Image (tube, grey):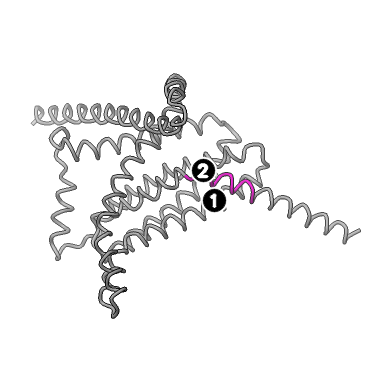
Amino acid sequence: MAGASLLTLLDDISVILDDVSVMTKVAAKKTAGVLGDDLALNAEQVSGVKANRELPVIWAVAKGSFINKLILVPAALLISAIYPPLVTFLLMCGGLFLVYEGAEKVIHRFWPHALPHDEEHEARLAANADETVDLVAFEKQKIKGAIRTDFILSAEIIVIALGSAAGATLLQQSLVLSILAVAITIGIYGLVAGIVKIDDAGLHLMEQEGAFKQKLGKIMFAAAPKLMKFLSIAGTLAMFLVGGGILVHGIDFLHHGVEDLAHLTGIFESVTTALLNGVIGFIIGAIIVAIFTIIGKMRGGDKSAAH
């Protein structure tokens, strides 16, 4: 009897693990788009950091990402069990933050005079140019911003994964989310570390003997800044695509309107949906930036009047 019970237990465990494996694969496929955005955004976050500080910054953000997921996984399971609509509300707040950050970056890039003077950015440039300045204090702000952005993207990944495991037991959902959280954190930040060190690897190859190694090194060294620039652009676009997608899915009339317009484009429906999500994300983000800018100017005016 004991042997039969043990075999039954092992069979049950095997079935659970098999179900978890299948659900994890499904969740990974559904979150693939967000993972690509996460990679682009995190690679973009370390741009402007000195070469010898890139890996420490990535490691600091990766540790923050692990803590984010340590908070988000149990929180998502708890909220889903107690009050599921709250998950959607929190996701909408995250979407608003992403489009706001993206719009602020675009406006700073193309219409810098439209926003208040960016003293922090100028201080960073001055610090990068001054070898005597300890950049750790400057990096702390950059790391905080990266961890904050990671929190929002991680929340969306976990919510999507939770949705793909709907109907499963609490144990299965917990295993799926935990496996996915660990795997994507190691994968994303491992890739980011590799990307930001391409130029160093190219420089190392250029110093080696052999024409092929030197040529490959030159290609890698020349490609590194172009790749980082591309990832910077892709990261900003990702903010609109991801944030806009969250907002569109959460607002019924926008969701139906986007679906109807995208359906008219036939085989390009998915591309049109993404573009419309991005455009809507930028518009909402620009409106939020305008509101905060007006409020900031009003406060500035009140302070000047008080003095």
By secondary structure, the bulk of the magenta-drawn segment is best described as helix
Of residue 164 and residue 221, the one placed in the foreground of this image is 221
Residue 278 horizontal/vertical position (percent): 35, 33
62 or 247, which is in the foreground?
247
Look at mark 1 in the image and give the residue it sits on: 180
Q: Where does the image place residue 264, in percent across and percent down from the top left?
A: 44, 22
**Residue at the spot 54% in from the left edge and 51% down from the top edge:** 180
**Residue at the image point whose x is 9% and y is 30% from the top:** 304
Instruction: From the image, tell me which residue sits under label 2.
Output: 158
Specify few, some or many for label 2: CA neighbours under 10 Å numbering under 14, 14-19, or 20 or more: many
Quadrant housing residue 101:
top left
Q: Residue at x 43, y 26 (%)?
A: 265
Q: Is residue 176 left or right of residue 192?
A: right
**Residue 185 among those drawn in magenta:** no
Left/right placement of residue 210 relative to residue 174 reads left
Magenta span: 21-32
Name the residue furthest right: 1
Q: In what element is the residue under mark 2?
A: helix
First in sequence, mark 2 or 1: give its number.
2
Q: Count up the numbered dots.
A: 2
Disc 2 marks a residue whose amino acid type is Ile
Residue 31 drawn above or below residue 257:
below
Badge 1: how crowded within 10 Å, few (<14), some, or many (20+)?
A: many
Give the x, y percent position of residue 284.
32, 27
Name the quadrant containing residue 50: bottom left
